[in-house]
Image: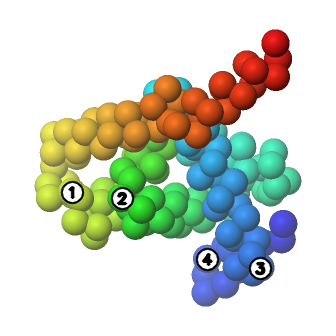
Amino acid sequence: MVWKLKYGKVGFLDEEEYSLVRSSLASHLTVNVASNNEVCTYTDIARYLKLQFDLNEDPISKSLAGLLGDISVDENKQGHPMLSVIVVNQETKIPGDGFFKLAKDLGLYEGLLNNIEQKDAFYISELKKVHSFWEREYDPEWSEYLRLKKKFEG
């Protein structure tokens, strides 16, 4: 993948590349993080994208918020909770301010952006929703995959 500077922001050369990275990241977050009731850091995501697409971590970190925001908007359109809630800051252990601003824009967060207690309460609530929604044992497609795998393995 090749990055370019556009309007002062680092981005992908074309929409197709962006779409590929976004869908790969969304799949990684659902299959490897949310379905296991875990969280990951922004650094973990940058490393994942570097390994998958051989991208430099610095440009990734600059546009990671946009990728995660787009994923959460897509999830919200499908009636799913905000998947980006599982990506947290290594020091604060909660998502960055962009997550809460997006939640407010989507009408999901009614608290104040500078109120730590309200942000923490929303974070915990949304995290529980994501973990519950993506839990493998409740995912019919995952259950079907496990059934077929068991059938063919013996």
Residue that appears at 49% across and 26% down:
137
Q: Judge whether residue 105 can be spotted in this image.
A: yes
Badge 1 crowding class, 10 Å Cα cut-off, few under 14, some 14 to 19, many 20 or more, is: some
Vertical comparison of 99 with 86: above or below: below
Q: Is residue 86 left or right of residue 94?
A: right
Which residue occupies the foreground of this view, 99 or 61? 99
Q: Nearer the viewer, mark 2 or mark 3?
A: 2
Residues under labels 4 and 2: Cα distance? 30 Å
Q: Nearer the viewer, mark 1 or mark 4?
A: 1
**Secondary structure state at the residue bearing disc 1:** loop
Q: Is the C terminus in the top left, top right, bottom left or bottom right quadrant?
A: top right
Q: Amino acid at mark 4?
A: Lys
Q: Nearer the viewer, mark 4 or mark 2?
A: 2
Q: Which residue is mark 2?
A: 79
Residue that appears at 33% across and 40% down:
129
Q: Judge whether residue 60 can be spotted in this image.
A: no
**Which label is found at residue 13?**
3
**Secondary structure state at the residue bearing disc 4:** strand
Residues under labels 1 and 3: Cα distance? 33 Å
Q: Is residue 134 left or right of residue 117?
A: right
Residue that appears at 67% across and 84% down:
6
Q: Amino acid at mark 1?
A: Tyr
Q: Earlier in the sequence, mark 4 or mark 2?
A: 4
Residue 62 position, x and y percent, is: 60, 63
Q: Which residue is mark 4?
A: 9
Vertical comparison of 92 with 111: above or below: above
Q: Which residue is mark 1?
A: 109
Disc 2 + disc 3, Cβ < 8 Å: no
Q: Earlier in the sequence, mark 2 or mark 3?
A: 3
**Secondary structure state at the residue bearing disc 2:** loop
